[in-house]
Amino acid sequence: MQVLSLGYCKDHYTKISEGTGRVVFNYDRNTVIKVAKNMAGIKQNTVEAKVRDFDDICAKIIDYDEGFGCVLMEKLLPITPTEFLNYFKVTKGEIVTLLDYHYFKSVFPNSATLEMIKNRIINHLGGIASFDNSFNNKTLSRVIQLMTKHKLEGGDLSTHRAWGKNDYGELRLLDYGLDNDVWTKNYKRIEKKIVRNGEKVLIQKCIVLS
C-alpha cells in the first residue's frame, strides 16, 4: 500500500486512539489504519503484519507499506472490562498471573521473576498444575500459544483495551505488536516509590526510548 504520513492521516481521517508508538484512525467502514509515531511504532506494525498464523484470535491485517509505517487492520467493536473477563471466565488477577507465568516461562525461564510467579501460584492459587489446567478455554489457550511463539508481552494481552469483538461477538486481539524485542530495545520502565495515605506505593511509568 502507499505510505500515508501521520500528518496526512490527521488531516483526512478521524482519530480513534493513540498509544506511545502509534495513532489509530478510522480508515473506512470496516478498516482502521495504524500509523507509527516513532521506531517503536514501526516495530509494532512489523510484528502485527508478520503474525499470520493466528487469524482465529487476531484482527486481520489487510495491507501495509514496505517500511511498516502504517498498517490497515479490520475494525472491531470496543469491549468493556466485564465483557473481557466474562468471555474468558477468569478474574483480572487470574489472567494476569496466567499470562505472566507463560511469558516468563518461555522468554526468561531462569529469571527471578518467574520464581516469584511460581511461588505465588503455589502458595495462593492451588499449585501450578492445578492452576494451569483450570482454564479450559480454547481462545485463552491460543493466546498462550501466540504469546509464547512470538514472544509477545503478556501484560498487553491481559487488558480489555487490547481486544475487540467482531460482528459475530467473537473476541479478537487488536493490539498485539509489543514483543520482547520491541519492549527491551524501545521502551524503559521507570519505578518510583511515593507515600500515599501514609503508605509507600510503587508507581511504574513506561517511556519510549525511540
Image (cartoon, rainbow, N blue to C red):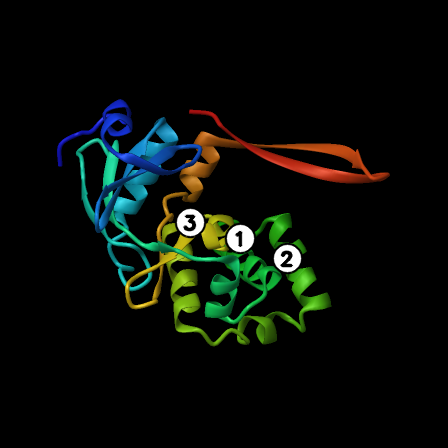
Q: Looking at the picture, which amino acid does disc 1 mark?
A: Phe
Vertical relation: 186 (above or below) 151: above
Kindly indicate whether the residue at mark 2 contacts the one at mark 1 (C-beta within 8 angstroms): yes
User: Which residue is tagged 1?
Assistant: 104
Spatial CA span between label 1 and label 2: 9 Å
Task: Provide residue 101's location: percent of width, then percent of height.
Answer: 55, 58
Sequence-first disc among 1 and 3: 1
Vertical relation: 55 (above or below) 64: below
Q: Is residue 81 left or right of residue 13?
A: right
Task: Provide residue 52's location: percent of width, then percent of height.
Answer: 24, 54
Spatial CA span between label 1 and label 3: 10 Å
Spatial CA span between label 3 and label 2: 18 Å
User: Which residue is tagged 2?
Assistant: 117
Of residues 130 and 140, the one drawn nearer to the viewer in this rendering:
140
Q: Residues within 10 Å of mark 2 (few under 14, many from 20)?
A: some
User: Which residue is tagged 3?
Assistant: 152
Sequence-first disc among 1 and 2: 1
Q: Secondary structure at mark 3?
A: loop
| 1 or 3: mark nearer the eye | 3
Where, by quadrant of the figure, is residue 7 drawn?
A: top left
